[in-house]
Image (cartoon, helix red, strand yellow):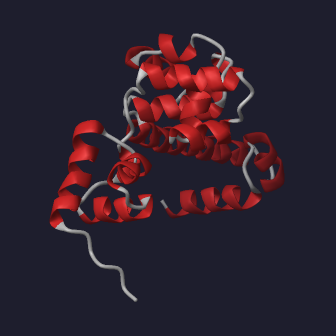
């Protein structure tokens, strides 16, 4: 039997809670006594890209609860179930350092730029998990910028590698040797050389 559609009044409440309070689907569901999946469905139908809405801050009282529970031996999964936040958020806010407090938008952007928007490299620089850096990037709205920057960096590296491949080939090196030197596959080297012949 098909489920009865939600009333417009409930749909309006879902949209208002998302827009005004930036609540997760789970929190909205809890508040309106409907499933998170239903909330997500109606948000998508009303033009929300639910992945892009990330709360910029969690109430301090909830952060303290997370930390207290973690100190008392609760697992991240148990804390998530109890408080309704994702494990990524809980991990981020219960990290035993000043990391969550000292990293503002400017610091995060500077770190990402200096790391060529590579989350692993950035995480290594500040002795944190890659997931925490990815979280910060989303929190401050840099995910799209990071994706574009990665594409540009990848394209530039590819151009530089192709140029080096052509130079090495002109010096008489074979495909396998070139592939090892530029850390690319043999097929990439062959394709690069073929594309240069055509141009």
Residue 38 in view of the camera: yes
Position of residue 64 measured from the top left corner of the image (x, y, whole percent):
53, 19
* Residue 57 x/y as whole percent: 39, 26
Q: Residue at x 67, y 57 (%)?
A: 188
Q: Where in the figure is residue 193, as x and y percent of width and height? A: 63, 57
Q: Quadrant of residue 191?
A: bottom right
Q: Residue at x 49, y 10 (%)?
A: 102
Along the viewing direction, whichever of 128 and 165 lies nearer the viewer: 128
Give the side of residue 43 with respect to residue 77, left or right. Answer: left
Please, is residue 15 above or below residue 121 in the view? below
- Residue at left 51%, top 33%? 135
Question: In the visual, does 158 lie left or right of 57?
Answer: right
Q: Can see residue 117? A: no
- The answer to whether residue 83 is left or right of residue 124 is left
Which residue ends up furthest to the bottom in the rendered image? 1
Where residue 72 sits, quadrant-wise, is: top right
Q: Is 105 or 149 nearer to us in this picture?
A: 105
- Locate residue 79: give its quadrant: top right
Q: Quadrant of the N terminus?
A: bottom left
Tell me if residue 62 comes above or below residue 146 in the rendering.
above
Q: Please give the name of the residue rendered at 51% of the width and 23% of the height, measured from the top-left corner.
A: 63
Q: How many marks?
A: 0
For residue 194, above or below residue 79: below
Residue 124: x and y in percent read: 68, 22
Q: Which one is in front, 58 or 196?
A: 58
């Amino acid at each position: 039997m098909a489920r009865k559609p939600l009333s417009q009044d409930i749909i309006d409440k879902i949209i208002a809670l998302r827009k005004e309070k930036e609540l997760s689907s789970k929190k909205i569901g809890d508040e309106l006594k409907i499933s998170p999946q239903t909330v997500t469905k109606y948000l998508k139908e009303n033009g929300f890209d639910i992945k892009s809405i990330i709360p910029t801050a969690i109430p301090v009282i909830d952060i303290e609860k997370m930390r207290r529970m973690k100190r008392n031996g609760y697992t991240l999964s148990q804390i998530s179930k109890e408080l309704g936040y994702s494990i990524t958020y809980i991990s981020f806010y219960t990290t035993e350092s000043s990391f969550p407090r000292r990293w503002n938008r400017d610091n995060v952007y500077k770190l990402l730029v200096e790391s060529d928007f590579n989350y692993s490299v950035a995480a290594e620089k500040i002795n944190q998990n890659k997931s925490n850096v990815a979280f910060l990037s989303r929190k401050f709205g840099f995910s799209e910028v990071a994706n574009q920057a990665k594409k540009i960096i990848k394209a530039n590296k590819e151009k530089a590698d192709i140029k080096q491949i052509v130079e090495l080939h002109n010096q008489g090196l074979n495909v396998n040797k070139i592939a090892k030197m530029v850390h690319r596959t043999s097929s990439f080297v062959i394709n690069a050389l073929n594309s240069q012949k055509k141009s």
